[in-house]
Amino acid sequence: MFFLVVWLAGTVNFFLPRLGNGDPVRDKLLQQASLGGNVQAGMDDMVADYDKKFGLDTPLWDQYVNYTRDMLRFEFNYSIANYPAKVLDIIGDALPWTLGLLFTTTLISWLVGGLLGALLGWPRSPRSLRYLMPPLLALNAIPFFLLGLVLIYLFAFRLNWFPLSGGFSIGTFPSFGWGFAWNVLHHSILPAMAIIVVSIGGWALTMRSMMVTTFGEDYVTYADAKGLKSRTIFVHYSIRNVLLPQTTALALVLGQLITGTVLVEVIFSYPGIGTTLYNGIRGSDYYLVQGIVFFLILSIALATLILDLIYPLLDPRITYQKA
Amino acid sequence: MAIAVPPEQAVRQRNPGAFTERVLNVFRYLRRNRSLLVGLSVLFALFLFVVIGRLTVDIGEARPMSVGSLDPPSRELPFGSDKQGRNLYAVMVEGTPLTFRLGLIAGVIGVTVGAFVGFVAGYYGGVIDDVLKVLVDVGLTIPGLLILIIIAMNVKAGLTVNQMTFSIAVLAWLYPARVVRSQVLTLKERGYVQIARLSGMSGRKVIVRELLPNLFPYLVAALVASVAAAVLAAIGLEMLGLGPFEAPTLGMTLYWVNYNAAIINGWWWWWVPPIVVIAMLFIGLFLTAVGLDELANPRLRNRV
């Protein structure tokens, strides 16, 4: 499954651009020519030259084989727009930002949303919690970046509590110190809030409906009849059993989370993969966009694989050994 | 809760004045199914906004340079104008149906194709099912937006609204196919389907006469979900700068908002209307989907 996803992604990634008869190098040169007013003479030579450099002049089949081999080694070629920089290096610079944002927000919203949903499904929790649900559900329906825009206006523009955009202040340099760490944290709160607040509702909803079904189960009734503390029933009998489908759900929405994060980054000009992708699109930087798309698909496939491997730890009934 | 007569049964009693009875029943049902009621009301409010807008504003003013640049809301321009001189009221009136239509077309195509694939795979099984199952699983793992980005990058002149609609539709069938397939797998074993099959009905007839009517509520719910997904994909593409630049869709309006940094320049009238309309559209569709789920699957009743 993992390899199939990666292979399909790579192949689609390779063939789709070639279906349209765009000529990236010529486009880029034309764009530069129109911007800088360069002379058009020698254009064809330059195109041929660049085509050779990027390997665009070889037959399609060779390109495909080369491409597949390159991708297996993460060799995404050079970025067309900022030539000497390699696509992989650009991705490498942006990756920690996205990974940090995505990982922490997903973890927080999954945990908080799950806990909230569990409490909502629990008959003995306070009723006041119930009023939280409708607004959270309504928020859950809108895209991350829509809330992001509102947050920018309220907390960054109006109240000036948080910076408007970026990953760290202009003028500071990335370093490993408390000052810089605080700076980064301060910049990341709003984008993180946009993702967390929107996604909590969804997790709470699925968690709650599953909790409700576990309370109907005989083993919960039995545990109750045995006189176990309700805390024990809550944690060890109900949550334990709901953990598995909730983890499956995580694997299912991973793709949405990543594309959602990409758009949030664009809104906040957060220096991660999303903003890099956006810049690549605006600069019609073929290889960069291709590399990023492939990389994102690869990460999703990888994360799905990891979740598959975690399953047996969560649910002892599942093993990958043949019976 | 008092045990009420399910509306479906009540409708079937053919008494005189059946039509008003039917309408009344629909309203009675809506009163119990709050999500559906609120969802449909929100969508209807948007519809009203567009209809009233059409009657009161010249749609041509949704084009750039038709009014002054960056005018705050006033009597003549209720929503103000943007930097390129579009009347934002006209943009909203023009863009809302444009965006909704895109979602609707992509959703209908997706559900139709998806239902077909799901029925065939689920009912006939065998090799077709195996191949389609893997295809759908793999396809659903890859976020559609990423593939759309690659497609859009390769259309030189930028996508038109219709090209964007069909690109999205190409990917929209995967999810309905999965939903329908799994439902068909359970329905296939039911008694009435077995009897239909044993009495010599052809596979096509079983699907059309027995399975399709029973899955209809699921299909409608899947349609609403697909419309929302398609609109989301379209707005995502547009935010990334891969949308139809000359069309005043909701997503493109947000793109210009972001491009011109309207928020930090304090041009609030530029970004508030598209955000409100998009939020209403999504919330309306979401609640309608939840309500329809409840209709399709009565066990969920009174949960949300």
Image (spheres, coloured by chain):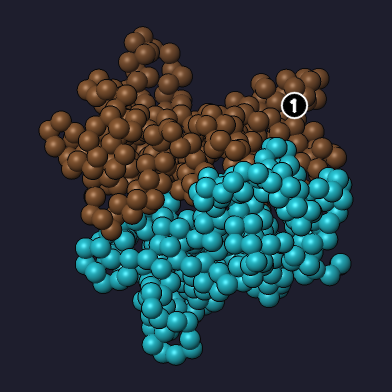
Chain colours: A cyan, B brown
Position above or below: A263 against B33: below
Please identify the quarter of the rendering in which residue B216 is found.
top right
Q: Position of residue B217 (x, y in %)?
A: 53, 32
**Label 1 neighbourhood size at 10 Å, few (<14), some (14-19), many (20+)?**
few
Q: Position of residue A98 (x, y in %)?
A: 53, 68
Q: Which residue is mark 1?
A: B195
At 77% from the left and 61% from the top, the residue drawn is A71
Pointer 1 chain = B
User: Which quadrant of the figure contains the C terminus of chain A?
Assistant: bottom right
Q: Is residue B144 visible?
A: no
Depth check: B22 or A283 in front? A283
Q: How many marks?
A: 1
B142 horizontally vs A140: left or right: right
Depth check: A34 or B57 in front? A34
Tell me the kind of residue under disc 1. Ile
Secondary structure state at the residue bearing disc 1: helix
